[in-house]
Structures are given as structure tokens and as C-alpha cells.
């Protein structure tokens, strides 16, 4: 079979990619033939040597300008000493200079000439990126496969499963894997064979390709036998104290930005600062009471987190925010014990976008991991992302660059714990839901400020949803109560998933 490109050009593709802003996809128009051929180089960490070449399907090479974008650039391969065809010039004329590169090939030797501008020195770091990825497979036993290179094969069996439990899930972590929730697949009961796992790269996104004996598996949704599911034995609830309730959002904004004229000490009509999240605490309490009443949960443990100033911020913070940044509220084993559940978790102002949600999540996981209970789950309630992640491929890293800016903002603290904690939850089979609270009452705060805030919250929810299951609710008591019951019911079902599929990695 004739190679798609000469090896002399395949070898420097990674360097060429870096000269074109490190795009994930490189469309190659090979104008050495008439008509030109169009190929795609997909740069994915999970591919052997980091790049996969395929013909460009379903598109005419003359229309590739419509495919060029943030993640996709163009490489034009020309025979040296041959005049460029008019049709090729038509494509070039429709492109911005930064979106394409040109390289010439000697017709006699297949050796490439350098770019119009010299290629920068660059060392391919594919192997170091590979160390940061893993494949997570949820069968009877959860398996995490580090440095996963696709395609790969596993031995799979559903011989001990019925038609409901013959299901398993797959997810990837790290560069070039989709962030977010696992993808579920179902087998026929009593099946045993070799499972082939691959991903088909595409310009608009990659797709899982799973086959057994050449027959493809289709995606499904997990079967949740709610009628057979007992209550959660232990639910960890993590509350974000920097989130004000809907009625107090504008007051919290005015306070943080020093624009308030309210007298917290003398005006009896103005709620004290610490009460600014009272509706959240009450709604969450009532929701957990209802969950106890509906026999969805047997025991609740609670944590909270808040922002605290670092040394360099001390002179800018107008209120004494006392350490620590994470703590425990009261536990409960029955609905009547929920009355003062979060009385010690009153409002505390946020100081920037990031808050230590990952620290509270880590403490909750540690407690659940060392408990005697097996049916357990975690509910996070608030509107803050965790501290800036150290993982460069984290979906949350996009929040570092404000809209319209080209340079990341300065962050006070970084931590790898959010993604590490969520990976640990997958391993321990602990489902997690983040109940994200939104606001609709903005008082007299200027419209342009509100627009910026709402856009920021949209960005946060989009980023968080790529790392954890996200539910949303308005930050008002009744909304939070209903959303809490719904979330606990969903967590109970996920904790009761029946999985009868076993998988074993085969030696490469």
C-alpha cells in the first residue's frame, strides 16, 4: 500500500505543527499530484508516536478553508520547481497567513525544503504528555490504565451478568481525551471475547470505537434499577460558603467592592453579612430532611470551604476572614437532626474566581474511603471552581484567561487535587454531583457588570461540567430544596449501579 506521505515529510510533522500554533489537526494538501490529495494529521497523545494520518473524507480539497479554525491549520505540500496551480492559489487566497504553512518537496528525492521561515527548534514531548493520560474502565472492578495507547485490546466477559448488569463504562483523563462523564456500553449476557478499544479522530471531535469480534458496540445509558436500590448509607455534602443566596447577591457584590452604604451594626432591616447565604443553607437543609423522609439516605456528613486571603492580599481585604479554609459542619442520621446542620457555615466573601473546593472534596473522600459503608456519594453545593489546577490539560485551565485577553491572569494558589480527587472517586465507585447555584436578582448593579458576571458563570459551568456531573438551580430556598432531593436521588441510583462485566488488560 502506497504511503500517504513520504517518511521524509512525516518525520518533521510535529515540528511543523508547533510552528502553526500547536493545532490538534493539520490538513495537508499534497499538490504533487493532479488533482491534489487532501489528508489530515491528527495529533493525539493516545496514538502511537502522537500522530495519525488519514485521507480527508467527505470534503473537497478546494473547500478546506471552511475547516480551518482554532484547532485546525493547513499545510500545503508543493513539488519544488513547479508552478502552483490556479485552484491551489484560490484556496490560499481565502486563508489568513497565520493559518497555513508551505513546504516544498524535491520531486527526485522526496526530501522537503524548509518553510519560508525557518522552523523553530522544538523537541517533541509526546512521551511526556503520554505520562499524563490514563484510560478508566468501569466494570465489576474499576481499572485505570496509565499511558494508554490506542488501539488496545482487553478480554471481556459478561457471563455472570443478566440483561440489566451487562454494562460497562469507559472514560479518558488527560490531553486529547474528552473530559466529563464516562461513556457507557452494553453487552449481550453470557458473552466472552476480545474487546478492541480505539478512537476515531475527527476535525469536529473524536469518537470511541469499540468492537468485539469485528462487531461494533453502540453507546448507551447506564441501567439504574431504582426500584431495587436501597438508600445511600453515607452522603458527604460540601458547601461553598462564598456563594450568596439570590436575594443577597447585590448586597454581597456591593460589600466586596466597597460600594455599600448599609450599616450592618445599626440598621435592623439589613441582614448581617454572615446571613447572606441563609436561603442556601435553609434550602439545602430542607432538601436533606426531605431526602431522609423519602428513605434516600441514612447518614449525612458535611464539609464547607471558603476563600481566605494570602499574605500579599492582607492590606486589600476589608474584613477579618479567619482561617481555616475548610472545615466540617454537623452530621445527621435522621431528618430531625438536620435543623442546625449548616449553622456554622455562614457566608464568607470570595476574594477571586478560585476557591478551595478541591481541599474539601479531598477531605470528604478520605472520610468516605475509611468508612465501613459501601453505598456512598458526594454532593457539592455552590458556584466556585476549585483552585487553579496544575494540570495544563485540565478543562478548568481555560478559566485562567479572561474573555478577550491573550495572557492568563495571575492566580494565587494552584493545586492538582481536583482532578486527582475525581479520579479517586471513579476508582472507589463514589458518584459526585456538583449542584451549581445561579443568580437572577441583581438589584441596582450596573447592567454591564451583571453581563460580565453571568458570562463568567457560564464559563465556569461549562468548564466544571467537563470534569464532574453538574446540576444547576437558582440560589433560592425552594429551588435548592427540590434540586437537592433530585441530586440525592440520582446519586443513590448511581451508587446502586449493577455491573456484571469483567475486563482484563491483555499483554501488548
Image: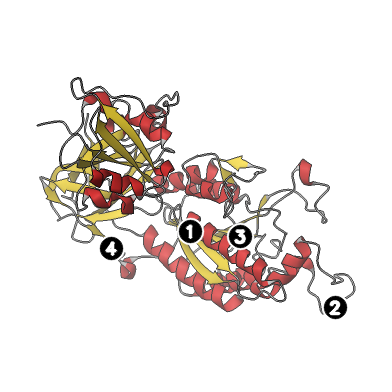
Task: Give coordinates of residue 58: x percent, y percent.
Answer: 19, 53
**Mark number, residue 462:** 1
**Mark number, residue 223:** 4
Q: Earlier in the sequence, mark 4 or mark 1?
A: 4
Marks 3 and 4 close (CB-CB < 8 Å):
no
> How many C-alpha atoms fall within 10 Å of the one at disc 4: few (<14), some, or many (≥20)?
some
- Label 2 SS: loop
The residue that label 3 is drawn on is 239
> How many C-alpha atoms fall within 10 Å of the one at disc 2: few (<14), some, or many (≥20)?
few
Q: Quadrant of residue 390?
A: top right
Question: Disc 2 to disc 4, how far (Cα)?
Answer: 53 Å
Q: Quadrant of residue 97?
A: top left
Query: In this orientation, does residue 132 appear?
Result: no
Question: Disc 2 to disc 3, how far (Cα)?
Answer: 27 Å
Q: Nearer the viewer, residue 263 or 443?
A: 443
Q: Earlier in the sequence, mark 3 or mark 1?
A: 3
Outermost residue to the right: 266
Residue 479 placement, left or right of 125: right
Question: Disc 3 to disc 1, how far (Cα)?
Answer: 20 Å
Placement of 23 over or under 247, stated as above or below: above
Q: Quadrant of residue 481?
A: bottom right
Amino acid at each position: 500500500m502506497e504511503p500517504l506521505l513520504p517518511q521524509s515529510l512525516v518525520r518533521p510533522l510535529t515540528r511543523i505543527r508547533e510552528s502553526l500554533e500547536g493545532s490538534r489537526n493539520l490538513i495537508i494538501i499534497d499538490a504533487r499530484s493532479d488533482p491534489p490529495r487532501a489528508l489530515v494529521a491528527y495529533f493525539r497523545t493516545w496514538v502511537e508516536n502522537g500522530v495519525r494520518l488519514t485521507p480527508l473524507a467527505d470534503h473537497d480539497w478546494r473547500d478546506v478553508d471552511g475547516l480551518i479554525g482554532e484547532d485546525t491549520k493547513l499545510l500545503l505540500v508543493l513539488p519544488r520547481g513547479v508552478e502552483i496551480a490556479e485552484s491551489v492559489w484560490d484556496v490560499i487566497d481565502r486563508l489568513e497567513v497565520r493559518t497555513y504553512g508551505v513546504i516544498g518537496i524535491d520531486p527526485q528525492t522526496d526530501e522537503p525544503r524548509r518553510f519560508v521561515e525557518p522552523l523553530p527548534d522544538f523537541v517533541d514531548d509526546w512521551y511526556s504528555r503520554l505520562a499524563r493520560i490514563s484510560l478508566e474502565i468501569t466494570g465489576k472492578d474499576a481499572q485505570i490504565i496509565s499511558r494508554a495507547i490506542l488501539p488496545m485490546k482487553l478480554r471481556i466477559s459478561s457471563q455472570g451478568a443478566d440483561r440489566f448488569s451487562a454494562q460497562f463504562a469507559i472514560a479518558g483523563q488527560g490531553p486529547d481525551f474528552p473530559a466529563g462523564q464516562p461513556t457507557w456500553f452494553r453487552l449481550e449476557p453470557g458473552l466472552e471475547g476480545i474487546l478492541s478499544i480505539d478512537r476515531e479522530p475527527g476535525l469536529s471531535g473524536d469518537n470511541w470505537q469499540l468492537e468485539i469480534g469485528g462487531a461494533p458496540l453502540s453507546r448507551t445509558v447506564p441501567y439504574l434499577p431504582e426500584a431495587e436500590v436501597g438508600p445511600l448509607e453515607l452522603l458527604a455534602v460540601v458547601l461553598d460558603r462564598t456563594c450568596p443566596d439570590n436575594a443577597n447577591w447585590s448586597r454581597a457584590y456591593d460589600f466586596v467592592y466597597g460600594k455599600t452604604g448599609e450599616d450592618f451594626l445599626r440598621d435592623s432591616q439589613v441582614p448581617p453579612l454572615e446571613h447572606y447565604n441563609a436561603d442556601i443553607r435553609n434550602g439545602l437543609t430542607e432538601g436533606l430532611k426531605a431526602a431522609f423522609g423519602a428513605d434516600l439516605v441514612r447518614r449525612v456528613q458535611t464539609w464547607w470551604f471558603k476563600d481566605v486571603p494570602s499574605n500579599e492580599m492582607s492590606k486589600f481585604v476589608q474584613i477579618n476572614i479567619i482561617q481555616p479554609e475548610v472545615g466540617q459542619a454537623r452530621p445527621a442520621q435522621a431528618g430531625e437532626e438536620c435543623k442546625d446542620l449548616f449553622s456554622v457555615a455562614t457566608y464568607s466573601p470570595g476574594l477571586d474566581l478560585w476557591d478551595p473546593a478541591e481541599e474539601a472534596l479531598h477531605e470528604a473522600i478520605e472520610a468516605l474511603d475509611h468508612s465501613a459503608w459501601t453505598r456512598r456519594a458526594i454532593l457539592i453545593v455552590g458556584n466556585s471552581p476549585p483552585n487553579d489546577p496544575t494540570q495544563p490539560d485540565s478543562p478548568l485551565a481555560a478559566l485562567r484567561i479572561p474573555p478577550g485577553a491573550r495572557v492568563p491572569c495571575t492566580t494565587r494558589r494552584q493545586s492538582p487535587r481536583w482532578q486527582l480527587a475525581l479520579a479517586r472517586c471513579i476508582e472507589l465507585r463514589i458518584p459526585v454531583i456538583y449542584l451549581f447555584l445561579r443568580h437572577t436578582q441583581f438589584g441596582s448593579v450596573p447592567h454591564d457588570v451583571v453581563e460580565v458576571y453571568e458570562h463568567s458563570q457560564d464559563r465556569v459551568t461549562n468548564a466544571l461540567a467537563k470534569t464532574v456531573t453538574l446540576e444547576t438551580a437558582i440560589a433560592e430556598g425552594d429551588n435548592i430544596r427540590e434540586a437537592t432531593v433530585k441530586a440525592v436521588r440520582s446519586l443513590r441510583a448511581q451508587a446502586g449501579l449493577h455491573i456484571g462485566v469483567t475486563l482484563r488488560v491483555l499483554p501488548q
